[in-house]
């Protein structure tokens, strides 16, 4: 089931509360209208009761009554309401009217005017009771006048008031909905423009979206889209760089392998063929190393790093294990590869990138350190940092070249060992991913001292 549009949701959130408010307000309006109708018609009941009470006389100790015609003619007969009245003397004897009219709920010697409703002859009837003192017959003598009217006219008036009020409210709600629809239409225009901008873009265009003329509510969304496109741009550029580097750098060793194979195939003697195969093997090993370095570099690119999981790790046991894995390669050159460490050395890192960083540092040291040389890997915690150092007794790097060696495929002009110029580039990318600082110095052993300073992980 497709989800509702934002416009539909806004209308629902508006119309449902308005409908509930209208229902509640209609009920309250009906009660208010009924009260207003009672107030208006009760005045007629009151006037009729007063007029009838004025017609009560005491003559020769007898109570008599004369009911003025105006007392009953003042009622509105438009809705054919029935009017009833009753007059009772001091001993509750019926002087005039209907003897079975309902008495007020609190019948007694209470003087004044009382209004109440009761069911009389199957119809709801509104009554007015007036008790008036007859001092000529004694201090406690009184006459009671009851006047009642059925409620058709009252109900009609209350209905008319309610209908007029609800009609006005419906017009008001209709106007409000229209204004809201108009406001929503114009309010959603920036979002529609944003949609059109995205739909009309070229599929390869990942430039940031403009933030001007955008309402504040859309800015976080556009900021998030721009951040996503920035990540996609970095990943795309990293992929392009990888493809370009791989195609450029692998072309030379592959061409060399092809040439060596062709030369070897022309050899007729065994020694010449063995020498050619050795050259092919060396070129193949260099191509494999280059391919591995290119893959390692792609894993250290920012676009790939953003997808990796970083956690708190102790560098000490990891570096000890990884250094031990490199010992066989050092022994082939009769080099002394040692490890020193004092832990724990906790950092926030990714083990894959950390392994790439250390393996490239040690691999470089083994490649460029002469036979029977010395290589030392150490790690320790210093204040707010974990410091990793790799020290060798190789030729070192001149001070003027220490910035350029981090560039891709750059090698020293007088470099003797095999390599592709990516080792320190990979080390720098891995260090940047961990917000670490890397520095090249002269070692006390005459070679190179590489120092990588990691931020200490929070406790």
Image (spheres, rainbow, N blue to C red):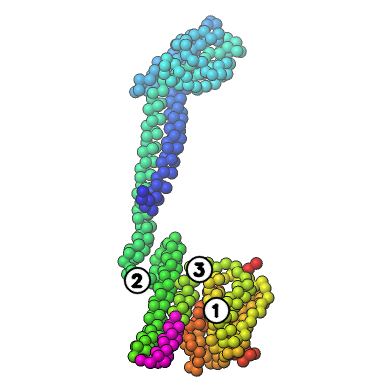
Does the segment drawn in magenta span residue 282? yes
Badge 3 local density, few (<14 within 10 Å), some, or many (20+)? few
Secondary element type, mark 2: loop
- Residue 440's spot in the image, x, y percent? 58, 86
Image coords of residue 300 (percent x, y): 49, 75
| Residue at 45% across, 11% down | 98
First in sequence: mark 3 or mark 1? 3
Residue at image coords 41%, 87%: 277
Q: Which image quadrant is residue 398 in?
A: bottom right
> Mark 2 or mark 1: which comes first in sequence?
2
Quadrant in which residue 48 is drawn: top left
The image shows residue 298 at horizontal and vertical percentages of: 45, 75
Q: Residues in magenta? A: 267-288
**Would you place residue 318 above or below residue 175 in this image?**
below
The one nearer the camera, 246 or 439, is 246
Specify the farthest residue to the bottom: 414
Q: Nearer the viewer, residue 122 or 418?
A: 418
- Look at the numbered disc 3 and give the secondary structure of its residue: loop
Residue 228 placed where, x, y %? 43, 67
The reply to whether residue 231 is visible in this rendering is yes
- Residue beneath disc 2: 204
Q: Left of 299 or right of it: where is 186?
A: left
Q: Which residue is mark 3?
A: 308
Quarter placement of the C terminus:
bottom right
Q: CA distance from mark 3 to mark 2?
A: 25 Å
Residue 359: assigned label: 1
| Marks 3 and 2, the one that precedes in the sequence | 2
| Magenta stretch: dominant secondary structure | helix
């Amino acid at each position: 089931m497709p989800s509702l549009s934002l416009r539909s949701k806004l209308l629902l959130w508006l119309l449902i509360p308005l409908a509930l408010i209208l229902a509640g307000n209609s009920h309250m309006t009906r009660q208010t209208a009924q009260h207003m109708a009672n107030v208006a018609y009760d005045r007629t009941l009151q006037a009729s009761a007063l007029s009838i009470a004025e017609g009560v006389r005491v003559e020769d100790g007898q109570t008599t009554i004369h009911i003025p015609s105006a007392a009953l003619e003042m009622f509105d007969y438009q809705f054919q309401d029935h009017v009833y009245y009753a007059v009772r003397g001091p001993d509750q004897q019926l002087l005039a009217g209907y003897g079975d009219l309902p008495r007020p709920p609190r019948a007694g010697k209470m003087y004044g005017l009382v209004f109440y409703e009761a069911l009389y002859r199957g119809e709801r009837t509104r009554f007015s009771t007036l008790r008036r003192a007859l001092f000529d017959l004694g201090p406690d003598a009184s006459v009671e006048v009851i006047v009642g009217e059925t409620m058709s006219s009252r109900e009609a008036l209350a209905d008319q008031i309610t209908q007029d009020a609800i009609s006005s409210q419906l017009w008001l709600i209709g106007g409000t909905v229209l204004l809201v629809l108009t406001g929503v239409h114009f309010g959603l225009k920036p979002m529609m423009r944003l949609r059109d901008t995205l739909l009309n873009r070229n599929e390869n265009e990942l430039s940031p979206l403009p933030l001007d003329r955008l309402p504040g509510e859309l800015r976080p969304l556009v900021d998030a889209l721009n951040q996503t496109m920035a990540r996609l741009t970095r990943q795309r550029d990293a992929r392009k760089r990888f493809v370009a580097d791989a195609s450029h750098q692998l072309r030379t060793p592959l061409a060399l392998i092809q040439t060596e194979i062709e030369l070897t195939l022309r050899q007729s003697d065994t020694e010449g063929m063995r020498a050619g195969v050795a050259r092919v093997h060396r070129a193949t090993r260099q191509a494999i190393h280059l391919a591995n370095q290119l893959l390692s570099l792609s894993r250290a690119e920012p676009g790939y790093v953003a997808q990796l999981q970083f956690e708190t790790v102790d560098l000490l046991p990891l570096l000890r294990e990884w250094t031990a894995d490199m010992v066989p390669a050092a022994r082939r050159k009769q080099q002394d590869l040692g490890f020193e460490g004092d832990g724990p050395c906790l950092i926030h890192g990714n083990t894959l990138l950390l392994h790439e960083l250390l393996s490239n540092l040690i691999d470089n040291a083994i490649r460029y350190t002469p036979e029977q040389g010395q290589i030392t890997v150490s790690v320790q915690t210093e204040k707010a940092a974990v410091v990793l150092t790799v020290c060798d007794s190789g030729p070192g790097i001149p001070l003027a070249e220490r910035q350029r060696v981090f560039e891709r495929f750059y090698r020293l002009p007088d470099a003797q060992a095999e390599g592709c110029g990516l080792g320190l580039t990979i080390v720098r990318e891995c260090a940047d991913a961990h917000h670490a600082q890397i520095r090249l110095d002269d070692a006390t052993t005459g070679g190179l001292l590489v120092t990588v300073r990691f931020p200490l992980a929070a406790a």
